Structures are given as structure tokens and as C-alpha cells.
Image (cartoon, coloured by chain):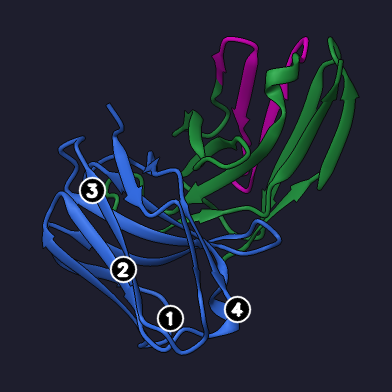
Amino acid sequence: DTAVSQTPKYLVTQMGNDKSIKCEQNLGHDTMYWYKQDSKKFLKIMFSYNNKELIINETVPNRFSPKSPDKAHLNLHINSLELGDSAVYFCASSQVNAQGQVSFGSGTRLTVV
Amino acid sequence: GQQLNQSPQSMFIQEGEDVSMNCTSSSIFNTWLWYKQDPGEGPVLLIALYKAGELTSNGRLTAQFGITRKDSFLNISASIPSDVGIYFCAGSKNAKTSYDKVIFGPGTSLSVIP
């Protein structure tokens, strides 16, 4: 059983399109995240939700809108995609008192052409 | 902003050799963590450290939380081909809540030559 699962695994789309990435965790964690990994492998947090409430919102363009229908799901919607949005996006989750211990999904490789 | 530095950036070693890598920061962290990322997968936690000076092992892996709380080290003994991947250090300021951001280093890419 996959603990943190995200779909799709690969996403190729044209500039200007709107796309969504879905994420679900079956670990019973209260906190979920979206991370972005660029071509140089830098991992940077984008958003953090706790029990459906936004906790962390880094300096991310407002074209990126996370949505958490319940604490087991955190989806990422991206409007008006740009070339620079190409990256691998990781969903992750953790317990409230996990002290940095985060479980990651296997990533969604987004390519904007 | 907070930044972590890792060295070396990449390593090529022979199977069976020991590996050492480190992570430094200009600011203090209360928690240090080491993650490994296999190609095409998300990072997986290897070791977590919560106390300055702490030395923790996980199989062939040993990590230490620096006394100054500004650095951490990871050693891998007797490397094998499946050790290939990117090793990320990560730090957190607040040990009591996951609301605090976990900051990741830029990674050390390890290649093992059979």
C-alpha cells in the first residue's frame, strides 16, 4: 500500500494551460505539504496544510492554488502554466509532532512546453 | 533566509569504500535529518537527530548532530550499489511541531562503481 500517492506521475502540457495534481495519504497524518524540486535537485517547500488549514505559504505565485478537501487529501491546481513551472512536485505528509520526519510521494514530473 | 550547505556536491566511489558527507548551516537547528532520494522517487528518511552531540546508526549508516548545532555528518560504511542516490540533509528549528518548516540542503549525489 502506497502511503503518500500522487497522480499523475508525468504531466506534459502547453504554456497557458491549467492543470491539477492530486495527492492522498493513508498514514493518518494531520499535516500535508507540497514541495518543488527544480532541475538542480533543490527541494523547496511551497505549502503546508494542517487539518485542511493553510499553515505555510511560501513565496509562490498565486497561479498555484492548493486545495484540501479533507486532511487525507491535498491537491495542487496550477493556472496559466509557464515554462519555469517545469519541475518535479512532491506531495508529503507528517504527524503534528513528527519533528521533521516527513513522508514523501514519488513525485509528479511537470513539463511545460 | 535559512540555508544549508552540503559537501561534497557529488561523489564517485568504489563499491566497498566508506563514504563521509557533511552539512553545515550559519544558524542553529534543533533537529537534523538525513534523507535519501532514489532516481524517480521521493526522498526517504534515513536518520533523525534531536540532541547536540547525538550519534545515531541505522545499519551501515551513522549520523551525528554537531555540538554547535550548526552541522551534521553522515557516514556510510562498506558502500554497495544500491547506496546510489542523492542524500539530503535537512534541518528544523522547532523540535516540537511539524508546523515549522523543514529546510533541505542542496544534496550530495553518490555514485557507486561496482
Point out the stretch of residues depicted in magenta. B56-79
Q: What colour do you see for chain B? A: green
Say what secondary structure mark 2 lies in. Answer: strand
For the residues tagged 2 and 3, is the chain the same?
A: yes
Host chain of mark 4: A
Residue B8: tell me if it is visible: no
Say what secondary structure mark 4 lies in. Answer: loop
The mark nearer the N terminus, 1 or 2, is 1
For the residues tagged 4 and 2, is the chain the same?
A: yes
For the residues tagged 4 and 3, is the chain the same?
A: yes
Q: What colour do you see for chain A? A: blue
Q: Mark 4: which amino acid? A: Val
The mark nearer the N terminus, 4 or 1, is 1
For the residues tagged 3 and 1, is the chain the same?
A: yes
Give the numbered dot on residue A24: 3
Verify CB contact (< 8 Å) between mark 4 and mark 2: no
The mark nearer the N terminus, 3 or 1, is 3
